[in-house]
Image (cartoon, rainbow, N blue to C red):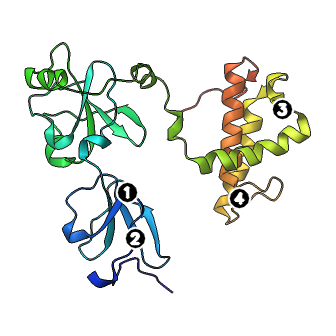
Amino acid sequence: MKFSHTNTMKDDDKPEAPEGYTAMLGKDVSTRIGLKFFYSATNLWVNCVEGFPLRRDDWYAVPNTEEEDLRPKAPEGYTAMLGKDVPRNAPADGLMAWCKMAWMPTEYSAQSCYPNNHYPDDWFAVPVSGHACTVIRDMAMKEKWTADPKASQAVQKPQLQLIPPALNEETAKALMRGAKKYGFFNWRENKVEMMTYLGAMKRHIDCLIEGEDIDPDTGAHHLGCVAAGCGIVLDARKHGTLVDNRPPKGQIN
């Protein structure tokens, strides 16, 4: 049976919005920031994902807040603004995009990508120093919020919050069995042969190809077992216990 998540409710059947939100039909919604979608099959409000289509006859919960209240704090030397407000003469380099809960470097530029046309409701961090245009610098002088001193340092480090929880969960399941059998972080105490782990990872991939999802030994998804093997090899490499016993380098294809 195929289910459709399109609502068929009329105006007089408006669902009760969560606290701090107002329920509106898609045809009346003028923003995509902070929206929730009413999934009529379960009578639940769910967060709208990035790039979702806005349907005229579906119900959405719009936050009862000013747009400025949703503005993320910009790193030092930057000002945060919506794509629709980024001037075309903004600096061509250094533009960052707000992805979920962190600023990420981006290849976008005001000249080539035109955030004001392509991503009008997304937040961008625009440089306000050096070769930045006067318009942006003047706007930054009027800002009432202050930048988090850790933000400018955080964007230069791996954004660990981007790793999906499902990957961590399945990887942990696979590692737990090894920890019970051999001890926690045993690969730091003993040499680890790369080919041994590459072979084990390939066997898990072969099981997936043959239609088996869950590894019967660990209870973890086979992809979690692959990720656990990758983690062990990378950690052993970092701590000097990895034995790189791969065959001589050949030519691929």
Find residue 37 and report its image quarter.
bottom left
Residue type (three-letter) at the residue carrying disc 2? Phe
Marks 2 and 1, the one that precedes in the sequence: 1
Residue where numbered disc 3 is placed:
184
Find residue 38 and report its image quarter.
bottom left
Mark 1 vs mark 4, foreground winner is 1
Marks 3 and 4, the one that precedes in the sequence: 3
Marks 1 and 3, the one that precedes in the sequence: 1
Residue where numbered disc 4 is placed:
207
Residue where numbered disc 2 is placed:
38
| Alpha carbons under labels 1 and 3: distance apart | 46 Å
**Of helix, strand and loop, which one carries label 4?**
helix
Compared across the picture, whether 178 is left or right of 75 comes to right
Compared across the picture, whether 184 is left or right of 76 comes to right
Q: Outermost residue, top direction?
A: 130
Residue type (three-letter) at the residue carrying disc 4? Cys
Up-down relation of residue 251 to residue 253 (above or below)? above
Mark 3 vs mark 4, foreground winner is 3
Name the residue rendered at 85%, 38% in the picture: 179
